[in-house]
């Protein structure tokens, strides 16, 4: 990969991360990032940087994630269901 391609790829990844951070439906909380990054790298590295695919992979592998990550996933899923119910 040329230097230009590397820079362009890094820019695209950074831009995607910023967009996803500011999209409430797609963003991971800072706690989830802290607690689950290691699990995501271990279990779902082939899906990175595709956030929806990483999320789906983590859900599929929930039985194999660390207890801290599982607790955050459960809390965020509950909060998401409550937001959806309130919106209806």
Image (tube, helix red, strand yellow):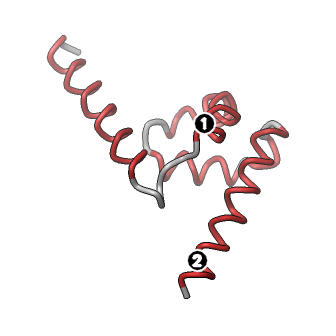
| Residue drawn at the location 82% of the way across and 48% of the way down | 63
Residue 58 in the image, given as x and y percentages of width and height = 65, 47
- Kindly identify which numbered label has been placed on residue 84: 2
Report helix, strand or loop for mark 1.
helix
Label whose residue precedes the other's in the sequence (2 or 1) = 1
Q: Residue furthest right?
A: 67
Image location of residue 3, percent across then percent down: 18, 11
Q: Which mark is residue 25?
A: none
Image disc number at residue 33: 1
Which residue is located at x 65 percent, y 31 percent?
34
Residue pushed farthest bottom? Answer: 88
Q: Are marks 2 and 1 in contact (CB under 8 Å)?
A: no
Q: Outermost residue toward the left?
A: 4
Q: Nearer the viewer, residue 26 or 29?
A: 29
Residue at the image point whose x is 47% and y is 55% from the top: 26
Mark pair 2, 1: CA separation? 22 Å
In the figure, is residue 28 to the left or right of 8?
right
Dot 1 alpha-carbon crowd within 10 angstroms: few under 14, some 14 to 19, many 20 or more: some
Q: Is residue 40 left or right of residue 19?
A: right
Q: In terms of secondary structure, where does tag 2 sit?
A: helix
Give how far across and how far down residue 78 sits, in percent. Answer: 72, 65
Quarter of the image that includes the N terminus: top left
Q: Quadrant of residue 15?
A: top left
Q: Residues within 10 Å of mark 2 (few under 14, many from 20)?
A: few
Residue 54 coordinates in the image, percent (x, y): 54, 45
Q: Residue at x 74, y 56 (%)?
A: 75
Q: Is residue 4 above or below residue 30?
A: above
Q: Quadrant of residue 21?
A: top left
In the rendered view, would you say 49 is above or below 87?
above
Q: Between 86 and 43, which is closer to the camera in this rendering?
A: 86
Residue 76 falls in which quadrant of the image? Answer: bottom right
Residue extending furthest toward the front: 86
């Amino acid at each position: 990969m040329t230097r230009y391609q590397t820079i362009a790829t890094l820019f695209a990844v950074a831009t995607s991360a910023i967009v996803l951070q500011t999209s409430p439906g797609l963003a991971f909380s800072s706690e989830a990032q802290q607690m689950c990054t290691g699990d995501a790298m271990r279990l779902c590295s082939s899906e990175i940087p595709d956030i929806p695919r990483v999320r789906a992979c983590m859900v599929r592998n929930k039985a194999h994630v660390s207890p801290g990550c599982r607790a955050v996933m459960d809390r965020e899923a509950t909060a998401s269901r409550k937001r959806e119910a309130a919106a209806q």
